[in-house]
Structures are given as C-alpha cells and as structure tokens.
Amino acid sequence: MSTRLDELAARVSAARADAAARGETFYPGPSRIHLAAFPPKQRWDDWVELESTDWPRRTERHYMLVPTTCFNCESACGLLAYVDRETWQVRKFEGNPEHPGSRGRNCAKGPATINQVTDPDRILQPLKRAGARGSGRWEPVGWDAALDDIAGRIRAAIVDGRANEVMYHVGRPGEDGFTERVLASWGVDGHNSHTNVCSSGARAGYHFWTGIDRPSPDHAGAEVILLISSHLEAGHYFNPHAQRIMDAKQAGAKLIVMDTRLSNTATHADFWLSPYPGSEPAILLAIAAHLVRTGRYDREFVRRWWNWAEYLAAERPEAPRTFEAFEAAFGELYASYTFAFAAAESGVPERTIAQVAETVAAAGTRLSTHTWRSAAAGNLGGWQVARTLFLLNALLGAVATPGGTYPNAWNKFVPRPIHTPPHPPSWNELTWPLEYPLALNELSFLLPHFLKEGRGTLDVYFTRVYNPVWTNPDGLSWMEVLTDERLVGLHVALTPTWSETAFLADYVLPMGLGPERHDLHSYEQYDGQWVAFRQPVLRAARERAGAQVTDTRQVNPGQVWEENEFWIELSWRIDPDGSLGIRRYHESRAHPGQKLTVDEYYGWIFEHSVPGLPAAAAAQGLTPLAYMRRYGSFEIRAGVGAVHEEPVPDSDLDDAATDGFGRVYTRAPAAASPNVVPVGTPEPDAAGRRPVGVVVDGVVRRGFPTPSGRLEFYSRTLAAWGWREEAVPGYQRSHVHPTALDADQMVLISTFRLPTQIHTRGGNAKWLDELAHTNPLWLHPTDAARIGVGTGDLVRVETEIGAFVVKAWVTEGIRPGVVACSHHMGRWKLREQGQQGQRQVMATVDLTRRDDQWRMTRLAGVAPYASGDPDTARIWWTDVGVHQNLTFPVHPDPISGQHCWHQAVRVTRAAPGQAYGEITVDTAKAHEVYQKWLGLARRAETHSPDGTRRPYWLMRPLKPARDAYRLPETAPDERAD
Ligand code: SF4
C-alpha cells in the first residue's frame, strides 16, 4: 500500500515541478492526483487527450476548452465545453474549475448537456402551424417572417391600448431581469412565471421575515445543518450546496433532514424525521419554544434585531414596552407547542424531537437551514414552513454568521444593465388578481380559469422553456384554453425541445441550450458574490480562433437562436422607426441609432458594473468581455458578512427622520450599495423620504429591507392586509391534515423529483433517461398489504378531479398512510404528433374528450428507433412513467399564492381493464375546486389598508409604475377597516 501511495506522491511532485517549470498553476484535482486534475486554465487553448475509442492506439485529440454554465437547473454550475479543434464541434462537457460556486463539480445533468446538444429529435428550425392547433401539422418558416408576424401583433396590441393581451410566461429563466426589461421597454405588464407552482411558499416565508425572498445558508461552515427535504440530491442550488454540505459533514457537522420520504439525503442524515405532511411547522415551533424555555437562544441578537417592540405595540398594548415583556409574551404565545403536541401532529416520536431540539440548541450561530419547495410547496399555509424554520436562525442569532444563514441578496450580485427602461404603466389582473394581494409571484397556474371566466384574453402568448400542460396542475384545463383561439390568439413557444405545450403553439421557435446562448448569473451558494457567463461556446471558440461572429445562428446547430439577440431583433421590429419609444432601449450606446449587439451589451456590463473585473482582466491583457469569454466566471468578493450591522454613513443621513420604532428615513439620494441587492422596496415615510437604516442601540445601521428595518417576527403587512392571525410565525393545519381526510383517503406527495431528471428539457438526455425513466408510487408495506398489492402491481390513484393508474413500489422509505410519486415522469404525445416529440421519453397516447370529461389511454411506450445517433436503436426500456399532474386541481394558498401540491387520494388495486397510464379527468370539477379555493382569498378591495392593490414593498419580478398600484375606483365604505 505504502509503495502505491509513495508512487502517487512522487507523481504529484513531478507534476507540480513540471507545472512550475512551465509557469503554470498546478491543479491537484479532487483526488489529489494530477492525472485526475482539471486542465490548467493556461492550457485551455490546446488541451490534448487521447481518443478513447481508438485504444490501444494512442491518437491525440486537441481541444479548445470554452466555459459556459449549465442550464439544467437554476444552480448555473460552470461547464467546460471540449471543442474539437479539427471539427469545431463539442465532444463533451465537464466542470469548470474556475467557477466559484460549483468549483469544477457537476451533477449527472451537467455532462449530459452533450446529449441535449446532439439530440436527434431536437427542434432545429422555426416552425409554423399548418393545421388546427395540436393537429401535429407544421411547416418550416423563416425567422424573418415569424418575427414580422409576431412583432406586428404586439405593436398593434400596444398601439390599440391592449398591452395586457401580451404575455410572456417563463419556465426556466436564463438571466436575471433581461426579459423583464424587454417587457418594460414595451410598456407591458406581461411577465408571468412558473414560481407559484415552485417556490413562492418558501419565498413568502423568508420575505416576510427579512424583506428578501431566499436564504443563503453557509453549509460549509455549519455545525448543524437542518434541511426540510432532499437538498443533497435535488434541492435548491443542488450541486453547489450538496458539495458544501458534504464538506461540513466531513468536518463533523450534524445533519438533520425532515422529509416524509427516505430521500438519498435522508440516508446521509444523523437525524431523519419523517413527519406527517404539513406538520413541519409544529415541530419547528416546538424546537423554538424549547430554545426559549431553556434560555438557549441569543438574547442580545433578538433584542437588537427583532421588531419585538412593534409586536408589543400592536398585540400587547397593555404590556410594558420592554424586552422582558416580549420574552414573556413569546413564552405564552408558543406555550402549547410542546414536544408532545409536535409528536401528536407529526407522528415523529417525542424523544426524537427533543434530541433534535438539543442538537439545534448546541449549534449556536452555526446553524444553517434551508427549505425551498417540498413542504412549503405542498400545504395550505406551507409558507409558514420557511417562516418557522428561519425562526430558529433568528432565535440563535445564526443570521449572516459563519455557518449560519444569510439573506440571499447579500450573496448574490445583480449588475447594472446598459439600459433601464421605466416601469410599465399598467397592471395585469390576469397575473396579479385582486384576490391575492400578498402573493409573492404571479398566479400563473390559475390562468386557464381566469380566461374561462372571461377576465381577459391573450393576443400574443409566449411560453418560454415552459410546459404548463405537463408541469402545472390541471393540465387539461390548459389544453382547453390553449386550443381556443378566441382566448389565446397567437401562441409562440420558445423552446429547445418538443413539449406537450409546444404541440399547441402557432409558432415553435428553436432556442439555444446552455452552450448556445448568453446569460449572466449570480446565485447565493456560499458567503460570497460571483458572476458567471453562459455563452454560445462555438461562437466563443471561433472568436478565440480569430473568426468574426455577428449572429449566434452562424455557429449554432440548424437555425437555433439565442434569446437575447431574438428579443433585441423583435423589439426593433415592433418599433422600427423608434416612434413608440421602445427601440432606444435596444440601441447601441457606442453607435446611437444602431442595433445593440450582445458583445456591447455584456461588454458594457463587465466594464462598468462588475467591481474588480476590469482590473483582473487588464492584469492578463484582456478586455473584461474577453476575460469572461475565456474563464466564464469571476468572484467579486468573498466573506460579505453581516450587511445589516453596517453603520449608515452620515452622508446618507441628509434630513433624516426616525419613526417610533427606530426606522430611519433620509432625503439623501440612494447610492448603489456594493453589497445589497434590492429585493423588497420598503415604503417611503409620509414626507417622501426613503428608508435607509434602523437605529440599534443608538447607532443607525443598514438593517433589513423590511418595513421596520428589522427582522419581522411580527409582520405589520400581514396584519394590515387582513391576516392578523398569521402575522407571527405559526402553524395552521394543512388541507391534507388527518382531520380533513375521509377514512379511506391517504396523502399523495408529488413535490419531489429524481436527481437525474430536468423537467421538460431532460426528455432526450439519453444518459439520464437510461438512469431513470419511470415514477412508481411509493407505498408502505402496511398500506400495500391493506390494498392487496406488491411491487409492480397496478394501483389506481383517485384525486378530487380524476384518477391515474400507476405501478406500485412497496418500500419502508415512506410513512404509512402517505404515498409519493416523482413529478419528473409521464411525458406523452398524441398519435397525431407522429415522429415529432422526444421519442426517448414520451409515450404515445390517445386523448378523448366528451364535454368536460377527458380520458387518456396509452397506445405505446418508447421503443428503439433509427436516427443519427446509434444509441437510439439501443433503447431497452419502454416505460416512461405516468403524468399524475393532469389529475390535480389547483390549490392556491390565499396568502403566498403558492399552489399547494399535496393531494388527498384514494389508492386501490387497479380493476381489470384499468390499464397502466390511464388517466381520467373532469375539468368541470377542476373549475369547482378552483372556485372553492378562491373562496379562501381575502381580496384587496376589501382588505387593502391604503387603497392599493398590493403592498408596494413586496417584491414583484416586474414592478409596474407606482400609479398602477392604485385600486380601481372603489367607494371607501366598501373597504374594511
Ligand atoms: S446542479 Fe447539476 S443540473 Fe444544476 S446547474 Fe449544476 S450541474 Fe447543472
């Protein structure tokens, strides 16, 4: 053994000396062995590897290594494209060691990008519908003709005062704010996102606490990591967080995982808690109450940073305004949250909860916590999961501390763009309806019901890397409106791949994958700030080799385009002479009157908006743009620290005024803070001064972007807008609480995914499909015995509006009484679509409709087929899973707007004749369920305290002008106090 180690050590030393002799940095690589190392960046122009398929011949292949970022989840990990210098094609993708977030590592989906690029079924040219929508008949169309048609309709809508009929609905966003600014330049409040079927619940919980809608846990520095759900394998910022969680574990940190399912992450945990779905806040509040009861919390932090004085003033006006009085009030408020109560609600043993509480208490300021979708996206009131989880950080003072949890905006960098168009003047009630004034994001999944109710129509509807028919609940209601040309005049699908939704488009426009487009990213993955550059790698390679590329279509496959060039071109065609005031936001600064190019757009940002980048580039004799094209990422700063503690300089305190709780307002103009990304925009005071800080023990500090400037244990916003009972962290029983279920019902969890799948775009990633291609129903052995099924048997799952037939998987990895089914499977195409579609993962189905009654039956699974890729003839699986989301009605949470995914279901053995993949749905019932949940909402007209539609300080991805926030004319006496 020692001989082998000695040999390796000698090789490392030799390699180190070799690198030093060449003046290069030595990269020992993750295994500490040079042969496993990343290619040193000095050799990225000509990296040599042996051709694996030629072995034992030693044929050398020369590569140019070009960085980009992965597009297969939001993490934006760095990738290096290996561009063959002979063919100028990409051979493979590996990690980019220069990327500060991912540090050269990727999950399986990163390298699988090459499958997507070479997918024989991908869309390579613009297509126009040649028959009825959904008929499967298409004809090629030129980009010019498509652009002119779409631009003409948008122009007409804007000129005719129908701007609200233009909507852009995004699934996976590429770049922070680019398309929002495009819409703003058109004066259109038309942004729609997928966020309310994804993360709005968690965002709301964080936003009401901190004014910022995401956490940034410093997992690597933590002593205790508390995760709600499966962050090691599929959670938010998956790979960048997972590797840091493992770093912490290796250093001795304890891992606590709360997940009803035995996820891969749970298998790594010191404590795995499998709570009854929706009971998570009860456990978290019991832990919080324990911390306070035993005095194991950071009293000074709570005294200095919580808005406890506001709470006392609003809810305990009779109590003295002292911290001691608040401590007493807190104890009373949560006295009922005992371990016994939490155990009764969750089914987790009292003893285990007590052990976890002790473990959390011992973490002190090194407690990192995270929740994103999972429970926060599953339950009525799920947003309180995030609020009660962050309560633990707020009690321990584990906020913006090493090993604690930061507000994300401090660990994220959003650069200033070259042009900033004004806020649109109008308000679109199809996305921001009056029923949901506090929703964190657009009520996107209610759109079919709004259209059916006659709340409006759409003239031009873009779906962009979004597949609502498949991804959203209630997909057949989507199908009903997308096939109705009176409701949706023109549907443009911007997509790299076929999808259930693209089949229903009028234009299908092929958009670039991660290595075929530009985007700029920065995400909170540790206590630091970085930017990374997604770029069309063949364009960058050609340019590095001396060629000139003026349009990304010159290098992309087929006629695939990138979106930034597309949006600039489309905007010019909407306003060809500039008379609408749109074109100027898409013009060159350097050459007024000429079209903005992506080189100028990004070159300007890198030159003017990214601190430190120009100097780092100059040190290598590069322009900032050339630096980013070569290395793909740049770390702006590490160790940002506790921004809220920063004293506000006197220069920012011109004509300052302070409210009764210490919030400080100023007339000094806002200077761009190098640290803080604005998310919430707290209201000015009555005299129009802007909030600038908060007085803490006599010093004006930056604080948090909340109305009070402090951490808001008590949300005056929630109280003022009709939700006083939800104004502090709390627990409300979920819509799937046992008391809400019939005796024969179970809970279905559908909010998890397999770590090797990518929503729609992963469809034809062949390596990933081979790894995972079905979604059986997780069923506990006791339930399986009761139902009389074993693994592989068919079961029928009945929801409120329909049913689906799926295979059972009997496992002890799920609670009795709960079933689970991954949502990343069950893709389908109609027989009419023929050879179109993602043939490696889409079943062929028959779909019939009689009035509101729909039935889907499976005609065939997948099969081997001939294509340019010989691997498609080697497909050995037929099963592609079942599309359960079709059978889910919408469940909008009345506060956060999040769709509450968990379902109350009846699971029975499938009867003879009920075949695998069979789905039935009643869309009339779906509309009834929608109306029932709508009844939970508290409308702005009756609950707005100030005549506005929504608190101005709450985030909105695209904020309209302030005037648009005014409610439509309403008599004052129609509003509640
Ligand atoms: S975690 Fe995986 S899918 Fe997500 S960006 Fe990183 S490599 Fe890509």
Image (tube, helix red, strand yellow):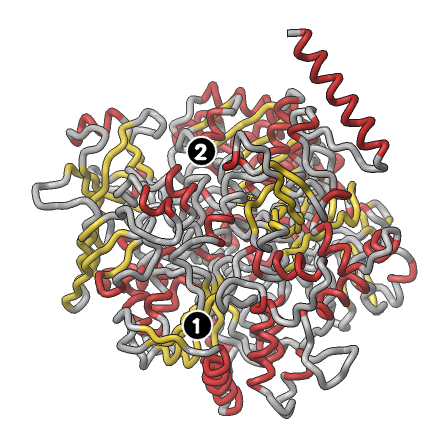
**Vertical placement of 102 versus 587: above or below?**
above
Q: State which mark lies toward you, 1 or 2.
A: 1
Q: Report the Cα–Cα distance between label 1 and label 2.
A: 44 Å
Label 1: few (<14), some (14–19) or many (≥20) C-alpha neighbours in 10 Å: many
Query: 616 or 208, which lies in front?
Result: 616
* Farthest-out residue, top: 2
| Left or right position of 863 against 204 | left
| Callout 1: CB less than 8 Å from ligand 1 | no
Query: Residue 217: horizontal and vertical position, in percent?
Result: 64, 39
| Left or right position of 727 against 821 | right
Q: How many marks?
A: 2
In percent of the image, x 69 and y 65: which residue is there?
Answer: 547
Mark earlier in primary sequence (1, 2): 1
**Vertical placement of 44 versus 499: above or below?**
above
In percent of the image, x 66 and y 57: which residue is there?
Answer: 541
Classify mark 2: helix, strand or loop.
loop
| Callout 2: CB less than 8 Å from ligand 1 | no
**Which residue is label 1 attached to?**
126
In percent of the image, x 25 and y 71: which residue is there?
Answer: 135
Could you tell me if residue 405 is visible in this image? no
